[in-house]
Image: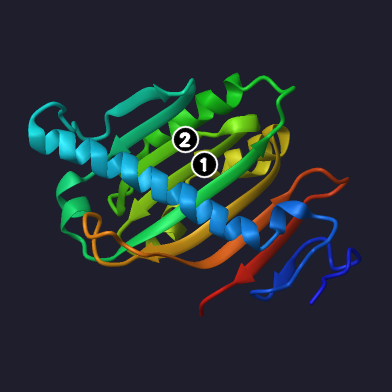
């Protein structure tokens, strides 16, 4: 099914196979591509925790770690290592943003640090991972206890400011996936994406849509 461009600009509801021809960042095949990137972020996290087990790293709560892979930045923050290891099913939020390369990234980086710094106010958040991708794209992953955790997080004034003001300035478009992981972090979990929200900041007005994959 094809969704026409004259859909209501403020909010659109997409089915699992719906196509929006003039908004290529909503292509359904990108969901699988994003799922693979989330898998890489999970591998980063597992690798870090394996290093902790081996005694070559220490996972200090809320400490930001960063490193380079092929010239691209990877970041990790572990909020609650014990609960992260113990849960057999985790909730996952995946953020994928197409950044505007001509815009100074400094205000976005400053806001990101401030948002991450207040994670200790939201004990449901267990970890935060970030990966720079080629072409100015970024992928972020948050693991948390329960879907309701994200509702508390969204009420953060810092988070609301970033969504309302910084995202339109710094990104052309955004995909935000909500889902869950099965079988625990160390048992080759399946990444199940339940819903995806799309934001397009390239037109005269912001365009939003949501695709439900699993009720």
In the rendered image, which residue does mark 2 sit on? 131
Most foreground residue, 144 or 183: 183
In the rendered image, which residue does mark 1 sit on? 139
The residue positioned farthest toward the front in the image shown? 70
Which residue is rendered at x = 68% and y = 74% of the image?
17
Q: Where's residue 201, x and y in %?
A: 76, 44
Which residue is rendered at x = 58% and y = 19% of the image?
106
Residues at marks 1 and 2 touching, judged by CB atoms closer than 8 Å = yes
Q: Where's residue 91, x and y in %?
A: 36, 61
Q: Where's residue 131, x and y in %?
A: 47, 35
Label 1 to label 2: alpha-carbon separation: 5 Å
Most foreground residue, 198 or 213: 213
Q: Where's residue 140, x and y in %?
A: 47, 42
Most foreground residue, 68 or 207: 68
The residue positioned farthest toward the right in the image shown? 6
Mark number, residue 54: none
Badge 2 element: strand
> Neighbour class for label 2 at 10 Å: few (<14), some, many (≥20)?
many
Q: Is residue 138 above or below residue 23?
A: above
How many labels, in total?
2
Q: N-terminal of the two: label 1 or label 2?
A: 2
Image quadrant containing the N terminus: bottom right
Which residue is rendered at x = 64% and y = 69% of the image?
211
> Neighbour class for label 1 at 10 Å: few (<14), some, many (≥20)?
many
Q: Is residue 120 visible to the viewer in this orientation of the structure?
A: no
Which residue is rendered at x = 78% and y = 61% of the image?
10
């Amino acid at each position: 099914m094809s969704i026409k461009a004259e859909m209501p600009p403020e909010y659109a509801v997409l089915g699992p196979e719906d196509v929006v021809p003039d908004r290529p960042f909503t292509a359904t095949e990108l969901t699988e591509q994003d799922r693979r990137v989330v898998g890489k972020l999970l591998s980063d996290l597992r690798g870090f925790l394996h290093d902790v087990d081996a005694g070559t790293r220490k996972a200090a709560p809320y400490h930001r770690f960063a490193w380079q892979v092929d010239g691209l930045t990877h970041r990790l923050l572990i909020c609650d290592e014990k609960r992260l290891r113990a849960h057999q099913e985790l909730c996952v939020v995946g953020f994928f943003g197409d950044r505007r390369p001509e815009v100074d990234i400094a205000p976005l980086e400053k806001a990101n640090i401030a948002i991450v710094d207040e994670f200790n106010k939201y004990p449901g958040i267990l970890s935060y991972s970030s990966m720079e991708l080629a072409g100015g794209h970024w992928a972020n992953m948050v693991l948390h206890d329960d879907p309701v955790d994200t509702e508390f997080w969204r009420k953060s004034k810092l988070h609301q400011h970033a969504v309302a003001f910084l995202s339109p300035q710094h990104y052309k478009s955004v995909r935000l996936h909500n889902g869950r992981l099965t079988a625990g972090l160390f048992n080759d979990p399946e990444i199940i994406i339940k819903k995806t929200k799309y934001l397009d900041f390239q037109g005269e007005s912001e365009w939003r849509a949501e695709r439900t994959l699993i009720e």
